[in-house]
Image: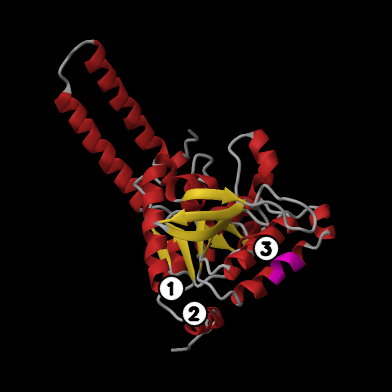
Amino acid sequence: MQLLEFEKPAAELERELEKLRSKSSSQNIDMSSEIATMEGKLAQTRAAIYKNLTPWQRVQIARHTSRPFMLDYVSLAFTEFCELHGDRHIGDDASMPGGFARIGGRRVVVIGHQKGRDTKENLKRNFGSAHPEGYRKALRLMKIAEKFGLPIITMIDTPGAFPGIGAEERNIAEAIAFNLREMMLLKVPVIAVVLGEGGSGGALGIGIADRVLMLENAYYSVISPEGCAAILWKHRKHAPEAAEAMKLVAPDLNKLGLIDDVIAEPTGGAHHDHKATAISFRETVLRHLDELEALSTEDLLNKRYEKFRAFGEWQGK
């Protein structure tokens, strides 16, 4: 597993703990007291590290290659997933899978960005950066959900929409902009969850929702910290300062009222325990679905409009 710099103290204790367990087992020695002491020290170290994470450290966790991706949540938190393909214009986009599924017994349509863990899968998934046909496919599935009265759950995990020449030729900006307008008018509940990276318009293209949730160690921003640092400080080495200034992590965005809830991750981050994170994800999503499904269609649309209309308001002292 990829080891982040600030995780090294805990990793060293894990190695020491494993040595103790191995010695106890191989030599048939009772070292339960030493093992318990080491386990306590490891738990304290982990708690100290992850209780005081900086925004830049959270960005690093959000990008961790062992972090659960969209299809991991589909397999762990949903059942009966039936993937649908194609945008009916150009083709299919493997970086934006979606289809019918069930969560907590409810039939829903689920859509999201999918990254890869190795070179072959990353090439197939385009590193989680969707093409125009990905956003058009997403909207096609949302319209199907609306037709059948099914809630929509989107999962955001992208550094941004694909900026290549082909994407520009097929009008990536129009595809995203059209989604923004149409998602605002959908007559069914929409929940968007930022799983890891929430980058720019690529994230917003499936991010207009009645409830916007974020994993505890995800980030959501108009630009990456490196991009911001390159513009304002003229060097990417200032990315940690940019991350601090941009208020792009879940705790900050929640305080600002730009998201609706933070989904707790297990100590150490989602990459250390996929199942526990999926349980937290499912419970939080179902709680918000209960609240949204209690609303009339008129109230749902009015509250969605008011939610986004209020962004950017400022009141002086």
Label drawn at residue 292: 1
- Find residue 26 and report its horizontal and vertical position in percent: 26, 12
- The magenta span reads 174-178
Which residue of the protein is positioned furthest toward the top in this rendering?
27
Instruction: Please say if the residues under marks 2 and 1 sit with CB atoms less than 8 Å apart.
Output: yes
Which comes before the other along the chain, label 2 or label 1?
A: 1
Front in this rendered view, residue 190 or 18: 190
Task: Tell me if 165 is positioned left or right of 33 in this view.
Answer: right
Q: Of the residues shown, which amino acid type is indicated by label 3?
A: Arg
The structure residue drawn at horizontal position 51% and vertical position 47%, both measured from the top left corner, is 60
- Find residue 267 and report its horizontal and vertical position in percent: 34, 46
Label drawn at residue 140: 3
Label 3 to label 2: alpha-carbon separation = 21 Å
Q: Of the residues shown, which amino acid type is indicated by label 2?
A: Leu
Label drawn at residue 300: 2
Label drawn at residue 25: none
Hey, which quadrant is residue 215 in on the image?
bottom left
- Find residue 136 and report its horizontal and vertical position in percent: 71, 61
Which comes before the other along the chain, label 3 or label 2?
A: 3
10 Å crowding of disc 1: few (<14), some (14-19), many (20+) = many
Secondary structure category for the residue under label 3: helix
Hey, which quadrant is residue 181 in on the image?
bottom right
- Residue 154 seen: no
Task: Tell me if 170 is positioned left or right of 134 in this view.
Answer: right
Secondary structure category for the residue under label 1: helix
